């Protein structure tokens, strides 16, 4: 790295974040239904429209990239953090 550019390392749980199968993504449930900031909704809508950057999509299957865009589109339309009305999506056993 040169030029004093910021560097970051991101850890992503591929099986949760990019799985093609539906899974209600982990959120802190106390924030369920909280509105998303408009600038974040715009970024999510752009992801839904354009897809992820090539550096990401080259690591995913076609179905995973489709699922990512589908989830991004739904989240952008919702405009708020999702909720779990069933109450059954907490990790078990609770500790």
Image (cartoon, rainbow, N blue to C red):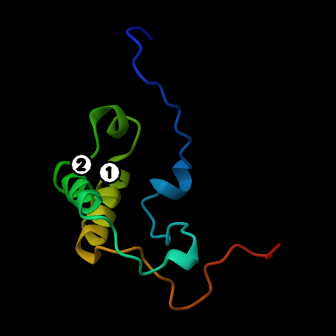
Q: Quadrant of residue 86?
A: bottom right
Q: How many marks?
A: 2
Does residue 57 sit above or below 84 in this rendering? above
Q: Secondary structure at mark 2?
A: loop
In percent of width and height, residue 1 lies at 45, 11
Q: Quadrant of residue 70?
A: bottom left
The residue lying at 32 percent from left, 51 percent from top is: 65
In percent of width and height, residue 69 lies at 27, 58
Does residue 39 sit above or below 58 in this rendering? below
Q: Residue furthest top?
A: 2
Does residue 8 sit above or below 30 in this rendering? above
The alpha-carbon separation of the residues under discs 1 and 2 comes to: 7 Å
Q: Are marks 1 and 2 in contact (CB under 8 Å)?
A: yes
Q: Residue furthest front?
A: 4
The residue lying at 49 percent from left, 30 percent from top is: 8
Does residue 29 sit above or below 69 in this rendering? below
Q: Secondary structure at mark 1?
A: helix
In percent of width and height, residue 34 lies at 41, 77
20 vs 37, nearest the viewer: 37
Q: Which mark is residue 12?
A: none
Q: Residue furthest bottom?
A: 86
Earlier in the chain: of badge 1 and badge 2, it is: 2
89 vs 36, nearest the viewer: 36
The residue lying at 30 percent from left, 64 percent from top is: 37
Callout 2 environment at 10 Å: few (<14), some (14 to 19), or many (20+)? some
The residue lying at 42 percent from left, 14 percent from top is: 4
Determine whether, in the image, residue 78 is placed left or right of residue 33.
left
Q: Which residue is mark 2?
A: 51
Q: Which mark is residue 65?
A: 1
Q: Quadrant of the C terminus?
A: bottom right
Determine whether, in the image, residue 50 is placed left or right of residue 25.
left
């Amino acid at each position: 790295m040169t030029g004093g550019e910021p560097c970051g390392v991101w850890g992503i749980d591929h099986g949760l974040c990019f799985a093609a199968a539906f899974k209600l993504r982990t959120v802190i449930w106390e924030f369920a239904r909280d509105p998303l900031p408009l600038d974040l909704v715009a970024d999510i809508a752009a992801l839904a429209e354009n897809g992820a950057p090539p550096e990401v999509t080259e690591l995913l299957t076609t179905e995973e990239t489709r699922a990512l865009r589908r989830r991004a589109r739904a989240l952008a339309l919702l405009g708020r953090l999702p909720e779990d009305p069933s109450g059954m999506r907490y990790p078990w056993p609770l500790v």
